[in-house]
Amino acid sequence: MPGQRHRFGILRCLLPILFSSLISLSGCGKPSGPTAEPDYNQPYPPEPGGTLISASIAEPSGLIPMISGESAASAIASNIFNTLLKYDKNLELTGELAKSWDVSSDQKTITFHLKPNMQWADGAPLTSDDVLFTWKLVTDDKTRTPYGADYKLALKAEAPDPLTFRVTYPQPYAPALDSWAGLQILPKHLLKDEDINTTAFARHPVGSSYYQLADWRHGESLTLVRNPKSTQGPARIEKLISRIIPDTATQFLELLANNIDYMGLDPIQYARVFPSRPDLNKKIALYKELGNNYTYLGFNLKHKPFDDGRVRRAINYAIDKQELIDGVLLGLGEPVASPYKPGTRWANPELKPYPYDPEKAKALLRSAGFEDHDGDGILDRNGKPLAFEILTNNGNKQREMSAVLIQRRLKEIGIDVSIREVEWASFIERFIKTGDFDVVVLGWSLSLDPDQYSIWHSSQQGPGQFNFIGYSNARVDKLLEQGRLELDPDKRMKIYHEFAKILLEDSPIVYLYAGYGLPAIHRRVKGIDNPAPPAGIGWNSYDWYIPEPLRRNEIAP
Amino acid sequence: MSKYLLKRLFWMVPLLVGISLISFLIMHLAPGDITTTEAGFNPKTSQESRQKLREMYNLDKPLLVQYGMWLKRMSTLDFGRSFASHQRPVFWQVTDDKGNVTKGMIQEALPITLLINILSLSLILVVALPLGVVSALTQNRLPDRTITLFVFIGFAIPGFWLALILMYWTGVMHNWLPISGMHSLGYENLGTWGQFVDFMKHLLLPVLISALSGLAGISLFVRNGMLDVLHQDFITTARAKGLPESQVVFRHALRNALLPLITILGLAIPGLIGGSVIAESIFAIPGMGKLFYDAVLMRDFPVIMGILTIGSALTLLGNLIADLAYAWADPRVRRGVMQ
Amino acid sequence: MKQTMTKALSNPLALCGFLIIATILLLALFAPLIAPYDPNAINVKAILLSPSSAHYMGTDGLGRDVWSRMLYGARISLLVGIVAVGIATLIGVVLGALAGFYRGWVDIFIMRMVDVMLSIPTFFLILAVIAFLTPSIWNIMIVIGLTSWMGVTRLVRAEFLSLRNREFVMASQTLGARDFRLIFTHLLPNSLTPVIVSSVLGVASAVLVESGLSFLGLGVQAPQASWGNILTDGKEYIQFAWWLSLFPGLAILITVLGYNLLGEGLRDVFDPRSSKTNL
């Protein structure tokens, strides 16, 4: 058939066209990385300029932090807005917009003294009036913020002069200082006639900190440039670009291809991929910092047999925390014994995690009445086997792996554990709010302020409240109440050290581990404080710099 | 004809109500709403403020009341605003009294998804037509078998796996193509042509990946259609008349074999606006799939409803247009419709 | 039936497909006998080992043997595919039969339901339902099944409509055969062939859908292995721990390919139009 050959011809021309177009397209792009790698290790003096590109999994929904609470938003907003106070590199409170602050002798009134001559990025003066305005916003019922509760506790707030802001509480409230390190101050002159919930300001913010928003390309990237009027002095790096890349595998490829400078690694990438690739280590430096949260195994204290402290402690002894850290985190984490960051003043240095001791675990269980009466390998009491379900939310690899390892260890001492993973919203609605669970594997943040009233106080057990495991201990209640009233850091420290000690003995949860944050940063970025202080690698990011010879080639006009 | 059209349009109303009801019920299959997301599980947020939010969104009302409110708004084509904290309009932009324009979420996500899908559909057609024809003409012989195997491999390969391999190969090992995103940094400094090339380079892999999986369907459709037509009497007649084979194949057979393709294209419309969650996540493209997926995870009900409703409405419309086009192209059907 | 099978398998591609599926089914069936390790046994000391004689396909991030997980994963992946398609086929056949047999309002109602379901982007629907329910293996099978019956319904209905007017059906109807009997003894058996083809092809799609759901974290949940979630586990380390993604990727590819080849081969034989083509 003559026609047939003809049609093969079509195919034959088509494929080369496709491929040649593929190659020619790629041919027109000039390589973005220079062929000769510069020497990243020689010392370079600090100089301003350059661009740092990072990747974010999600796009911020807006840049007004009290409205958009998600981490994608606060990571960027914290470069734009300032708070009255901040945490320094050792996680101690220090002034940001405030030069200093004093607490009245009855501990009910806090007076902040603002730094003089501060300006917003648009040149308008930044005064205590803006602080007062922000307080009014966050406490306004019409503002759709979940964070209002702390600020509503204040009886009144006033701005007697442009550099003074005073807030008065009906009774001493120690977490107040922490709360003022969390409220980013907004400009009154731009927002006073706006509806804070829907204002266009959320996408065109004007702030006072190191950077200002230059460009927001929907779904693609946000670009910040240096704010020349920064209240904190100038940053060194000229531009921060945050690219939105939802998939972490893609992010990693972009890092390898030298298209982003900064990303958080997972333990496998950190401990396995990098050591096997010396070429990567030449370009990319790895850092370690203490993470912001810990993973725990929590018991439903209203369910038998978890009401029995011996059972809880037995399970604590039966779990090998080091194995979890080695297995789940490849060694990149540490055990904790209190809900505070190790190395900060609130963490009680005397407390040690329960060691792995299966014999002690068995003995404790025996004393609680659990023995293997029927010889099926599972302990039982009154004919009921010691069996329960560990519940965790899906999509969190580390929690899932922890649950599996725990399951095996508990099996060894005769506890039959099953694992169930549930999608987050159902997890909360169906199980947590209704109290319909035995044991959960979840995480809490290692809070900077020691107040943990909402998590451990016995009054906080209602549906939707955070003491969902039903912990109730009169002494702990008392300590938590005292801690809230005490503004003196040293006295507070004693209170919370005792609190953490009781918590550890009671073992309402088993602290599993606190993982490290594992940032990988391109070696072109200099000025990084290594090893990271308690506040993390980014605490002085405004002092980072990228020497001119190491900067990425950008497409020039 | 117009009666037929009216009847079809009339049928769309109950269908759309049915679709929206199904969507609405699915959303409320499981407990949880926007205030239960992981970010909301933060000791700094209080139960009262979450309850307050719930009331603001009317989530405390009975299900049927909520559905009624939604229907009522829909009757004025108001898709509402997102439950997310930015509260952007779901569908189209709104301008506030100061002249600030807030773009709609679907409005921003739809163009890129449409573009990628139209490009990939075009690529599919360009490749699948010759493949299908060659397959049909060499039925059960080597070229046919090779083509069948090739298109099936394209269908069977898990897209995200291939995508990651290609990204590594073309982006990390060789620096031929960008890995993800839609524009290079410094894109705005390029000339018009440079911008176009840059954009196309970013789209190349996503389009290729999504085309690959659709190749099998269309090329087999063309193959089987051709086989079907090639054995009909009028082709035999044409051959008997001594027409050249190429003329028989192209003028007579292919034309008739392609007619049913119109229907297939009509059915492809939900896919066109649907977008692929997976491809969009991997390639960091802010399209419809990603929008929907994020809305599902956040329980952002107005967005979910908006996308499902618009998607379904467009699909119904697409089917209608496909039927009309088919009728217009095929006189036999046209007569049937007119009657 | 036997004859058509033999005929289908004379097509080398269909034969290939058949052999692939048979092999994988056997491997899945005898997984406990073949697998050298417990698929869920974690070994912290053997994390991410590359393939060797001890671990033919290496180990994963928890030190589990990938080959053993692949074997058990085959069970899950195939089960998901087959049960989901079973559900879809059952619904499709029943509704299609009702619509095609009774016509009139029943037909209109059922076909409108088909239209409704076809108008909602299917993957979106599956995604939403799985996310809102919990992603267990049963939910996944049921949801894929409940969202993919429309094709079968149309096929069966079309077959019924054409069969109803054939002489043998008319004859038995005039002889007073009951509807029920008519449907089951005459109409159904005669309209099953296209259903079989579409079911075989459906399994292929379901396996792919499961892997897609796994990518989004909504697939079969750990520690249960499925090819989809093994592949997803491996995607972060595609250049380093290549064995984690290569083997499940190939397994999915080969299986889906196998079902497609077999399905197309069967279609070629069943479809009278293309079977009379060997002029």
Image: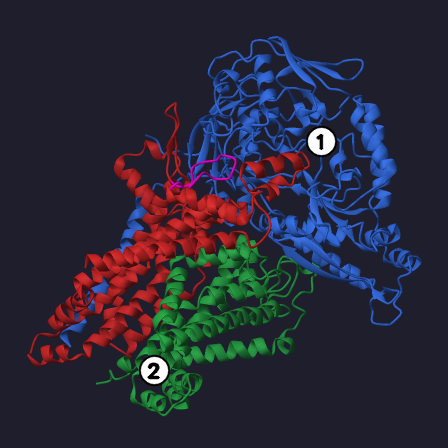
Chain colours: A blue, B red, C green
Q: Nearer the viewer, residue A285 or C198?
A: C198
Q: Nearer the viewer, residue C56 or A449?
A: A449
Q: Secondary structure at mark 1?
A: loop
Confirm whether residue A477 shows in the render.
yes
The amino acid type found where label 2 is placed reads Phe
Point out the residue furthest to the left here: B241
Q: Which residue is mark 1?
A: A448
* Residue B92 spot, x, y in % from top left: 37, 38
- With A502 as the anchor, is A292 left or right in this view? left
Give the chain of mark 1.
A
Which of the 4 image quadrants contains residue A305? bottom right
Indicate which disc residue C185 carries. none
Judge the density around disc 2: few (<14), some (14-19), many (≥20) Cα neighbours within 10 Å.
many
Q: Secondary structure at mark 2?
A: helix
Question: Is residue B80 magenta-colored?
Answer: yes
Q: Is residue A443 above or below residue A414?
A: above
Q: Is residue C49 above or below residue C8?
A: above
Q: Residue at x 27, y 58 (%)?
A: B7
* Residue B198 spot, x, y in % from top left: 33, 42
Looking at the picture, do discs 1 and 2 lie on one chain?
A: no
- With B86 as the anchor, is A11 left or right in this view? left
* Magenta region: B77-91
Q: Which residue is mark 2?
A: C270
